[in-house]
Image (cartoon, rainbow, N blue to C red):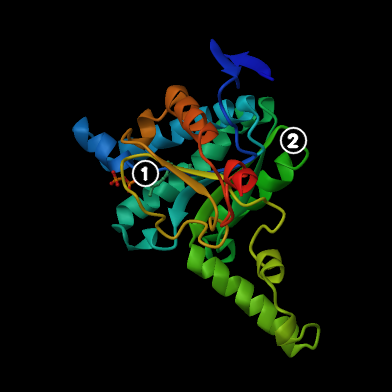
Amino acid sequence: MAITGGTSKNKTYDTAGLKVPVSLGVIMDGNGRWAKKRLLPRSAGHRAGAENLKELCRNCGNYGVKYLTVYAFSTENWSRPQGEVDQLMKLFVEFFDRYDPELAEEGIRVRFTGDIEHLPENIQKVCREGEERSKDRPKMQLIVAFNYGGRREIVHSVQSIAKDIKEGRLQPEDITEDIISSNMYLPDVPDPELIIRPSGEMRLSNFLLWESAYSEFWVSDTLWPDFGYEDLTQAFRDYAKRDRRFGGLSKKDTEEN
Ligand code: FPP
């Protein structure tokens, strides 16, 4: 049955023919190329990318996504020129200053995933305050991966488990996949069913390595600042046609046997 959602700024959130994931990951890539095409500095691309994140939140919330995880700054992004790193940090602070009222209006809770403890104190403050201020918002969780690396998250999980073993709370033979998952940064967030990567690259780039074991991938050539409602709708349309088998057989093949 088609569920007809609301409309926002003349957009229709009709899910007929689409499959909307409960948990979605987005790798926001292509800001630099977007700026270069316009003969603008890379900072203009990041600014346009941040603006577009607000739109993505609105569209995902209205489509019924419950958890949206976006890759905003990786543990590897520190190797960019200092000026660009500073600009991304500044943009991060401005984003929540400027857009929190709109996120509040949309009912969007904000959370952060990554090595937050090693970020500059002013950024940690934005994270703490943003999480606290938004904790009762009901519609969707926006999870911002900042100073995030999938491998570092796995290391974090392994270290917590090792501590539990050292302190006698766990035996090595009792380690299971569920225990590894429950020691990740945000264990209550479901694994993403779908990961979208704009800008044509076909790699994970250290994003949600553990959580993406069975995620479907959807890539498009659109650069992140231009990735809009139409692209998102097309991703959900294509996702409806995917046959997620989790290593088993499709329903049809099971019935034939
Ligand atoms: C990758 O594009 C993008 C980033 C490293 C930063 C993503 C950040 C934003 C979208 C805005 C800031 C986010 C928040 C939460 C305020 P790229 O620079 O690698 O692009 P390129 O591959 O075309 O050079």
User: Local crowd at mark 1 within 10 Å, few (<14), some, or many (≥20)?
Assistant: many
Q: Which residue is mark 2?
A: 137
Instruction: Name the quarter showing ligand 1.
Output: top left
User: Which mark's residue is nearer the viewer, 1 or 2?
Assistant: 1
- How far across and how far down the image is residue 44, in percent? 32, 35
Q: Amino acid at mark 2?
A: Arg
Task: Tell me the distance, in whole angstroms, between the alpha carbons under discs 1 and 2.
Answer: 28 Å
Which of the numbered marks, if any, corresponds to residue 69?
none
Q: Is mark 1 within 8 Å of ligand 1?
A: yes
| Picture layout, residue 206 above or below residue 105 | below
| Picture layout, residue 150 above or below residue 101 | below
Q: Amino acid at mark 1?
A: Asp
User: Local crowd at mark 2 within 10 Å, few (<14), some, or many (≥20)?
Assistant: some
Closer-to-camera residue (72/12): 12
Question: CB of mark 1 within 8 Å of CB of mark 2?
Answer: no
Q: Is residue 60 left or right of residue 76?
A: right
- How far across and how far down the image is residue 113, in percent? 59, 55
Q: Which residue is mark 1?
A: 29
Residue beneath the point at 54% across and 58% down = 213
- How far across and how far down the image is residue 224, in percent? 37, 36
